[in-house]
Image (cartoon, rainbow, N blue to C red):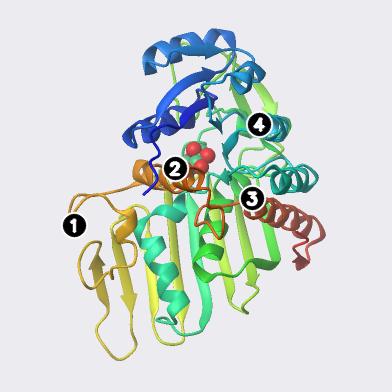
Amino acid sequence: MATLHHLRAGVIGTGFIGPVHVEALRRLGIQVTALCDLPDRVRPAADRLGIPAAYTDYRKLLAAPDVDVVHITAPNRFHCEMALAALAARKHCVCEKPLAMNTRETARIVQTARRAGTVFAVNYNVRFYPAVLQLRRMVERGDLGDIIHVNGSYLQDWLFKPTDYNWRLLPKEGGPLRAVADIGTHWMDTVSFILGAPITRVMADLATWHKTRQRPLGEVQTFAREDQTTRYATYPVKTEDFASVLLEFRNGARGNLAVSQVAAGRKNCIRLEIYGSKQSAWWCSEEPETLCLGRRDEPNAVALRGTPAFGPDAAPFVDYPAGHVEGFPDTFKMLFRAVYRAIAEGNTTAPLFATPEDGHQEVAVCEAILKSHQTRRWTAVRA
Ligand code: SOE
């Protein structure tokens, strides 16, 4: 098997998710040679993480000869410019989701990536939970029968209070949709991945609970805790706190999804229930190692990862034996292993990780959701 260890990574962005990338890469034995962020952030982050080169201009990171793969973990508004520059610099790329701010941008990335001949992945990490990979094979084999409908949610509470703040709240930083783009697209990408069928039509209702919020004076990281000394400025909120979406998939299955970032007590809970003509399957990220199988005439099964009832299909994407829980950080490790192997082996056909086309599709679904909400009608996805 071709080795990954000669490949070196550079990470742009040092917020919540950049260090998650660094940690996962190091668990794979990949050297992180460079970091990039604003001048006041990059040096302390590089020192904390033990990364030798700290750049304040991402173009310098892209020009560095000891960076083979660029990880874009900066706010959404920078994704397109940085992705196109990475492709022009002939670097392989892992870009955080959503791929960019709108389908004009994502279409440019798709076209440029097709010509580039380098590996480009969008970081839909939920695909790499063992239960999700197992479910995908089960659906492919017909173990669930024809898929009738899918139900689920992605719920968080880190934006529950009006004083909770992050760049994602601002449309110019994160795009016109917030909860749907940030976490709803994880759910939609995961379910499309499992079903092998994209979303074709949506009917959506978006809502904003906090019509105004208080912004701390100064910048705040994702999931940062409140500080009693902070001073605030009031601002109007233009992005949704929660959403309800009806979905149609290309294979005829129907779906309904609830998304919220103001669901007290739900920290980071993605849940899906797939109902088939033979049996159903349920999974939730709060118990990532458990897959439930629902049957009409036989007992339901609660299957633990690594046991026969769970099934063996995700085994190549698991490093620890049954009972030794793998979760959120492990999904990044498995996704990056797939990406770096594709680079090392020169193999880019039918990857399990999300491609620029998949990233484009999710942004197209977001645009259909916004249009549906505005027109109060079922809306086709134009990818
Ligand atoms: C913040 O909502 C966030 O970090 C998302 O951006 C991630 O994709 C998700 O995994 C956890 O929550």
Question: Considering the numbered disc 3 on the image, is that residue within a helix, a strand or a loop?
Answer: helix
Q: Which residue was labeled with disc 1?
A: 322
- Which residue is at a point 61% across and 49% down the rendered structure image? 180
Hey, what amino acid is under mark 2?
Phe
**Measured from the top left, where is residue 145 in percent x and y?**
45, 85
Q: Which mark is nearer the camera, 2 or 1?
A: 2
Marked residue nearer the N-terminal end (4 or 1): 4
Q: Which mark is nearer the camera, 3 or 4?
A: 4
Whether residue 160 is visible to the viewer of this picture, yes or no, is no
Q: Residue furthest bottom?
A: 297
Hey, what amino acid is under mark 3?
Gly
Could you say which is closer to the camera, residue 175 or residue 215?
175
Q: Which residue was labeled with disc 3?
A: 359
Marked residue nearer the N-terminal end (2 or 4): 4
Question: Considering the numbered disc 1 on the image, is that residue within a helix, a strand or a loop?
Answer: loop
Hey, what amino acid is under mark 4?
Ala
Mark carried by residue 53: none
Classify 10 Å Cα crowding around label 3: few (below 14), some (14-19), many (20 and above): many
Left or right, residue 380 beside residue 174? right
